[in-house]
Amino acid sequence: MISQSKHSNTAIIAIGSNMGDKMENSRRGIAALEAPGELTLVSQSDFYLTEPVGYADQPWFVNCAVMVKTGLVPGDLLQFLKNWSMTWAGATAESEMVRGCLILILYSTMTG
């Protein structure tokens, strides 16, 4: 069971894609994050085209950031995002470089 805190927590999450219709993948990724009802979208940045870092032999990324509110405590938010990444985005140990959509936690006001 996912535990909820009494206070609404804020997190900023980066979302990006470097496969297929990158913009649409990112938009669908944002919608998929909200769908289970654990996160509420507060705001979203513009989309940006960015060069890959580390492993350069891959397509460029379309990235954005979203601010969300959640009742999830930090460990549960991390698990929620890991599960989302594995099921929705298609990330696996073998395909870390090219994904339909990926996420990173950039900032959080969470405690606990």
Image (cartoon, rainbow, N blue to C red):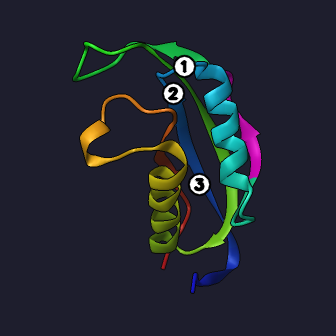
- Quickly name the residue at label 1: 20
- Quickly name the residue at label 2: 17
Q: Please tell me which of labels 3 and 1 falls first in the chain.
A: 3
Q: Any magenta on residue 39?
A: no
Answer few, some or many: residues within 10 Å of disc 2's Cα (few below 14, many 20 plus, some between 14 and 19). many
**Circle 3 — which element?**
strand
3 and 1 marks in contact (CB < 8 Å): no
Which portion, as a residue range, is magenta?
41-46
Q: Please tell me which of labels 3 and 2 falls first in the chain.
A: 3
- Quickly name the residue at label 3: 11
Q: Amino acid at mark 3?
A: Ala
1 and 2 marks in contact (CB < 8 Å): yes
In the rendered image, residue 59, in percent from the top left (x then y), is placed at 39, 13
Q: How many marks?
A: 3
Residue 2, picture quadrant: bottom right
Side of 58 relative to 104 (left or right) = left
Q: Nearer the viewer, mark 3 or mark 1?
A: 1
Residue 45, picture quadrant: top right
**Circle 1 — which element?**
loop
